[in-house]
Amino acid sequence: MSLSVSASASFQQTVLDNGLRVILREVRERPLVGVWMWYRVGGRNELPGTTGVSHWVEHMLFKGGKRFGKGEISKEISRRGGVLNAFTWIDCTAYFETLPSSEIDLALAIESDRIYDTRIEPEEAEAERTVVISEREGSENYPEFWLREEVQAVAWREHPYRLGVIGPKSDLRAMTRDDLYKHYKRYYMTNNASLVMVGDFEIPRLLDKIRAEFDQHPGGESPGALQIEEQPQTGERRVLVHRPGPTHYVMLAYHAPEASHADSAAMVVLSSILGGASSPIAWGGARGLGRSSRLYRAMIDGELASSVSCSMELTLDPYLFSIDATLRGGVEPARAEAAIVAELEKIKKEGVPQDELARIRRQLHAQVVYSLEGVTNQGFALGFMDLVAHDPAAWETFPEALQSITAEDVQRVATTYLDERQRTVGWFIPDQEGS
Amino acid sequence: MATTAGSALRPERLPLKNGLVLLHNHVAANPSVVVRALVRSAASRETPDQHAIAGLTGRMLRQGTENISKAALAEELDGMGAGLSVDVGYSLVAVSIKCLSDDFARAMQILGELLRRPTFPADELDRLRGQVLTDLKEMEDNTRVVAERTWRELAYPASHPYHRLMVGNAESVSAATRDKLSAFHSTWYGPNQATLIVVGDIPSEVALATAEEQFGDWAAVRPDPIDATLPASDLPEPTTREVAMTGKTQGDVIIGLPTLERKSPDYYALSFANHILGRMYFMGRFGEKVRDEQGLAYYAYSELSSGYGRGPWLIRAGVNPRNLDKALSSVDAELKRFLAEGPTEEEQADGVSSLLGGLPRALETNEGAAAVMGEIELYDLGLDYLERYPDIVRSLTREQVTEVSRRWIDPAHLVTAIAGPPRT
């Protein structure tokens, strides 16, 4: 039945005849199971005119198909003590259910129904249009949203990453039910998906159940690889956003390598040195880390900002290494920007002392441990690393790679990627003080 | 399922001689530990001239102590990979450290330093003040925060701690001094006002010995019960207030009223009603009606915040101004229908199964377990609470849920606050 099976100590991977990747991990401590279905479609697969279509389709996949009518998916999961949700991102759309392990069959039935049989009724699509617009409007209430959207829009010339995920209102108003359905039919198929389950089950028995649900679905025509390749940026780009708001915000974004690139681990370490560590492979982790980081000291202790963060996301294609700061009242953006750049230059020039690097390694190790608490988070890590690094084993090998990054690696990637010509800088300038 | 869930958490209650209670639960699923102190030293302890002092005192705990400076603390915690958070609420300050199990002893020592020996350095207070003033400006620009501030001002009398946001305002934050913080700390931070929680891969005897070592000689403070500062007050008049904000596209709406405290015998029935109205399935009846059926909002749900004092029951929704009237009347109709008819038989059965089936999930992480353990201790629920919980929920009847809802959610006292773009 299966074309290939690979096993490691921590999970088992199977590919069904129809191309569905199945990644399973037994965790028997609690009577729970975390179920994730990952589709390799998101903002990066969209074009102007229908930007936001992946996210809107995600909403429609809660509205019922052949076996589950409108509202029934949430109802069935909820009444059994489970939770469910989904998210859409630039690289993927993912659905999850966490529920008592006695209810595994229900989760499999839901995901099997979703993959080919979602109806997308015209009146339901129409009702959801205002929900999606409302979701965007909720984000529009925050100055940081406007700044990030603007910076992303100019950081790339070609790559769809510039369009984000939620989509502009004009597209959200213009898109039709048929646009949604076409997109659904093009990208939702077994050979463009991974089913990841972690929890209280026996793998052989579960595999039989999975086959019973999914073997009936034939694979489809592969959507193919993205043809768009971004040309290197040749000079700094700057954007200003003038809007009502409480204070100034500054964002610096540098082009950064993709997750599968040899430099991505060093970039994660660099980001942790600057802004404190978070788990690169899963959500969650401890709050309140990173107060000894370089940007915290320069910007918060230096009384320039009330918050500062640095992020290096793991993505399919080269994305952004970004720094965001919320400036204190009376601090000019130019001054804050100069202080941030000075910290970057210092690493490029002087490198990082061993004791600081040791602290960062420990932080990253701890954050990864914390982020893997629970079956839902472990399922996320396996599925996410399978998606962006093309290998679920990266849920272990990537954190290991972080531990072997040297001071020289950090200095080298800082010099390579934190280049002024590869940078987009955005300033949010409040029209008035408060509103 | 519920029995299994109950057995997943078997906290031990280990009181120290000075009044500090240690709650411990041994979990070996993840090599990490959560160490948390809950101290009844939050905003409701403030006198009228102490507004913002509780919040600043809490936030200053980590800015320097007798034995460790702010910078050294930051460096050490980062070197351990330990996250330290201080959350100041109305009744409780939660000081939590999440660390790897190997660092447990040092984490407890640090927690002892923070709670017992903060020095409130004046220069650090000035620095924090600047940061908080920027935070306050951001909050005044945040539709959700403005809606909540407005709602509280209308729903609780000015003398009540729940009348205001606990963070304070520019005036009170600017007026705070080192001496005021230090005095507040001396008055309220003590073993008899605190509960210590340890959840993770740490044996009970180690937890107790470490707690004795770090807190055994912590001197007691004033014993006043927290309930005394949270008096019952008259229910508000029905009011609606809209706050117009520039540059916003969505309005945030809060509708609700003060209800009951956690120890009220009606708590479980009202909480069950809230589950059906604003949580179960996809955010309850409100979510189903306003979002799923009518497409009027991205979010619509309700919450019951019962702790000490009469906490609020609130409906929250994010709505475009042009849909506001429709959304409000839809919420109103749904609430009135529930109060008239109560839950359906299906809802009642699903409510029970969803709450009980969800227990293992709620207890899956150390932080989830710590939250339940805190509730057990603070509200005297008893260590067998999770064993009793299934029967408590199963014994609720539709009639009881309906009757209790009618008693506590009187539409004649609902207060509505809306913050968002001006309506044209």
Image (cartoon, rainbow, N blue to C red):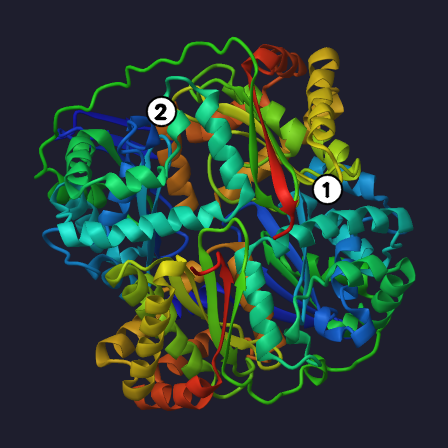
Return the residue nearer the eye: A326 or B327.
B327
Q: On the image, which quarter does residue B139 sit in?
A: bottom right
Residue B38 lies, in percent from the top left, at: 68, 66
Determine which residue is flagged by label 2: A160
Q: Chain of mark 1?
A: A
Where residue B23 is drawn, which disc sits there?
A: none
x 34%, y 31%: residue: A43
Q: Residue at x 75, y 58 (%)?
A: B170
Q: Residue at x 84, y 61 (%)?
A: B176
As helix, strand or loop, the secondary structure at mark 2 comes to helix
Which amino acid does the dot numbered 1 rest on?
Arg
- Establish if A73 lies above or below A144: below
Viewer-closest of B95 and B231: B231
Earlier-in-chain disc, 2 versus 1? 2
Left or right: A335 with respect to A364? right
Q: Name the residue type under label 2.
A: Pro
Label 1 neighbour load within 10 Å: few <14, some 14-19, many 20+: many
Where residue A121 appears, x then y in whole percent? 13, 51
Residue under label 1: A328
Using the rendered image of the protein, determine whether residue A423 is visible from the camera's viewpoint.
yes
Residue A117: horizontal and vertical position, in percent?
12, 45
Where residue A89 appears, x then y in whole percent?
37, 36
Spatial CA distance of label 2 from label 1 is 34 Å
Quarter occupied by residue B297: bottom left
Subunit that carries the residue with mark 2: A
Query: How many neighbours does mark 2 have within 10 angstroms: few (below 14), some (14-19), or many (20 or more)?
Result: many
Note whether residue A419 is visible.
no
In this view of the protein, which residue sits in the foreground, A59 or A220?
A59
